[in-house]
Image (spheres, rainbow, N blue to C red):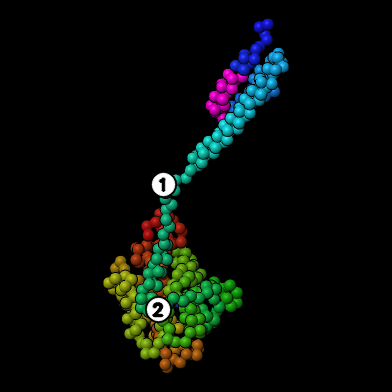
Amino acid sequence: MSQIESLSQIEEKLNNLSLTSKNNIKNAKDHYELDQLRVSLLGKKGQLSVILKSMGKLSSSDRPIVGQRANLIKIDLQDLIIQRKNQLTKEALDQQIENEKIDVTIPSTGTPPGNKHPLISTQDEIIDIFCGLGYSVESGPEIETDFYNFESLNIPKNHPARDMQDTFYLDETKLLRTHTSPVQIRYLENNPPPARIIAPGRVYRRDAVDATHSPVFNQVEVLCIDQNIDFSHLRGTVLTFLKTFFGDIPVRFRASYFPFTEPSAEVDVKWKGKWLEVMGCGMVDPKVLEKLGINSEKWTGFAAGLGVERFCMVRHQIDDIRRFYTNDLRFLEQF
Ligand code: DAH
């Protein structure tokens, strides 16, 4: 019967199946293809089962030979499938790693670096100059009491000087400081003279906004107390400072009035052909020192206060104070 297959025919089929399957398994492109192959070879209705079914027609002595052979092939193919599977998994992982690889040596496309706000660099420059003259930097609170902002500086209630500094009051006694001068008092309360300090900081006034006014602006306070300090020291210090900051530009002292200094002066620099006021100053009024328990016969000194915005505007030819606060990058990136 041509249907009945001999041992050698079945063995040949098995060998062929083994050979072609090994090849197919090695070449399986992906897990899906590999799984299809596994089912078609080793599954219940798979090629190996089909061959084994034909075994029934063999003699009982041949059957174990074919059975054994088929089993070995099955184990072999299973091993191969597992190997290929592992290989495919590894390849996929390698590919993923390759795809997600970050080359840390590629130059960055660049985050534009920030730079200092012109007011800050101006303030830094002012601080640098005074530090070079032996001054140290102090600070005080922006929320002040009526006492430190006014009373202690010889500005009692109803004093006309209070009108010059229209104040933001928080309650009966607390306010936003209108100048940095209260830092003079706070410092001297805690540190006996001599003193050489500057105090940069924000100050607040109820001013309507325009090209030269802002309700918040920046001042630097200067205070020097020592023995035998007179107006020439004040003048020398201010001129040295202005010359270092502006270079050689005309400067003049103009008599003025501040309740906490006597005599007092305002200092102007000539800019664009006009005199422009840049700071107030004077000899610390002995009354201010005496209230602090400092012997004004022995200790004298001078003080000054300057507006940082003014200095920055002159330095960079800026005509409108509002430019400092509107955060327009086209403006800020110029510095
Ligand atoms: N505090 C004054 C103001 O804001 C400026 C000032 C003037 C400060 C004279 C001083 C000074 O220390 O001596 O208008």
Residue 213 screen position, x and y as percent: 44, 67
Residue 315 screen position, x and y as percent: 34, 66
Q: Is residue 145 visible?
A: yes
Q: Nearer the viewer, mark 1 or mark 2?
A: 1
Q: Estimate the spatial distance between the alpha carbons at disc 1 and disc 2, rounded to whole Å.
A: 47 Å
Q: Answer few, some or many: residues within 10 Å of disc 1's Cα (few below 14, many 20 plus, some between 14 and 19).
A: few
Taking the image as shown, residue 144 lies to the left or right of residue 62, namely left
The residues colored magenta run 13-32
Question: Measuring 41% from the left and 46% from the top, which residue is drawn there?
Answer: 106
Mark 2 element type: loop
Q: Which corner quadrant of the image does residue 233 belong to?
A: bottom left
Q: Amino acid at mark 2?
A: Tyr
Question: Measuring 66% from the left and 20% from the top, which residue is drawn there?
Answer: 66
| Observer-nearest of 105 and 80 | 80
Q: Which residue is mark 2?
A: 135
The furthest residue to the left? 248
Q: Name the disc covering residue 288, or none.
A: none
Mark 1 element type: loop
Give the main secondary structure, helix, strand or loop, of the magenta stretch.
helix
Q: Which residue is mark 1?
A: 106
